[in-house]
Image (cartoon, rainbow, N blue to C red):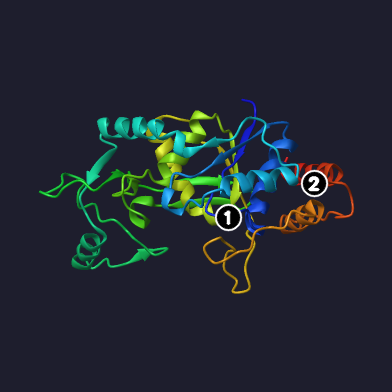
Amino acid sequence: MAYRGRFAPSPSGPLHAGSLVAALASWLDARAHGGQWLLRIEDVDRPRTVPGADEEILRQLAACSLVPDEPPSWQSRREPLYQAALERLVRERKAYACGCSRKDIALALRALGRDRTRHGELVYPGTCREGLHGRQARAWRFRVPEGLVPWTDRRVGVHLQNVAEEVGDFVLKRADGLFAYQLAVVVDDAEQGITHVVRGEDLVDNTPRQILLQRALGVATPSYLHAPLVLGPNREKLSKQNGAAAVDVADPGAALAAAARVLGIALDARGSVPALLAQAVRAWGARYP
């Protein structure tokens, strides 16, 4: 199958240094393998969307000569696809309605002696798996099967996760009516024929959930590579939420050279942008054939 990769930023602000690293890594992998590179604006979480951020992201990428091979897509225009996937999962009893609030979940976990969280999220105890028990439906959850989910990352190696124990039945459609990232990204990757996903290492933990959804929907699992993160002064991931500054693309060569250094590729920022990118493609292809 021909290589198809993608970069999928959320328009909660312009690209910062960390998101340029992810963009460059995904672009390099596509070019090193003679593939196509797509751009998807992940604006399904509308409350976090900043007006005009999508256009600024497109401008920043173009300034760095990172131009997609097809017109960009927006998740907000693809919601009928997510609804169809959800309805299929419900029909097949792979998803179900949930009437629990966060407080309900916390109380249920406390009663079970399992009052713990994973990355700040409560591990759902399965309260509504067999019915709503008189509650109104608030959200829709995926019925997670038991057992370990093994997968191999091209950069960081073999991973195992018991999603049922460590995450529980996760949300596919939220109480506010918005589709969850996990469902949207799986549907999009399948519908767009994505064969290779290259993204930041902060998303490693999402991969087992996405693999389970891919299996449930009968779609292919892409090859995954999670690139290193840019850390802030507090040693936490640089992000828009913690005030990361927009990457300066007035000198695109310098911006690309800085991003390449995070990926372990040394470039001379004094060269032309096409020359820098060609050098980076060769270095990437040698590292990740």
Categorize mark 2 by other alpha carbons within 10 Å: few (<14), some (14-19), many (20+).
Answer: many
In the displayed image of the protein, which residue is found farthest to the top? 1
Q: Quadrant of the N terminus?
A: top right
Q: Are marks 2 and 1 in contact (CB under 8 Å)?
A: no
- Percent across and percent down for residue 172 are 35, 44
Question: Three-letter amino acid code at disc 1?
Answer: Glu
Q: Is residue 197 above or below residue 227?
A: above
Residue 31's label in the rendered image is none
Q: Is residue 8 above or below residue 71?
A: below
Query: Can you identify the residue that label 1 sits on?
Result: 201
Question: Three-letter amino acid code at disc 2?
Answer: Ala
Can you tell which quarter of the image residue 4 is in?
top right
* Nearest the eye: 74 or 166: 74
Q: Taking 90 as reference, is 4 left or right?
A: right
- Percent across and percent down for residue 196 are 60, 37
- Percent across and percent down for residue 281 are 78, 42
Q: Taking 284 as reference, is 232 left or right?
A: left
Q: Is residue 220 visible?
A: no
Query: Can you identify the residue that label 2 sits on?
Result: 280
In the displayed image of the protein, which residue is found farthest to the left? 134
* Nearest the eye: 249 or 223: 249
In the displayed image of the protein, which residue is found farthest to the front? 51
Query: Separation of disc 2 and disc 1 at Cα?
Result: 20 Å
Q: Is residue 230 visible?
A: yes
Q: Quadrant of the C terminus?
A: top right
Q: Earlier in the sequence, mark 2 or mark 1?
A: 1
Residue at 32% over, 52% down: 168
- Percent across and percent down for residue 273 are 83, 46
SS category of the residue bearing label 2:
helix
Residue at 48% over, 38% down: 75
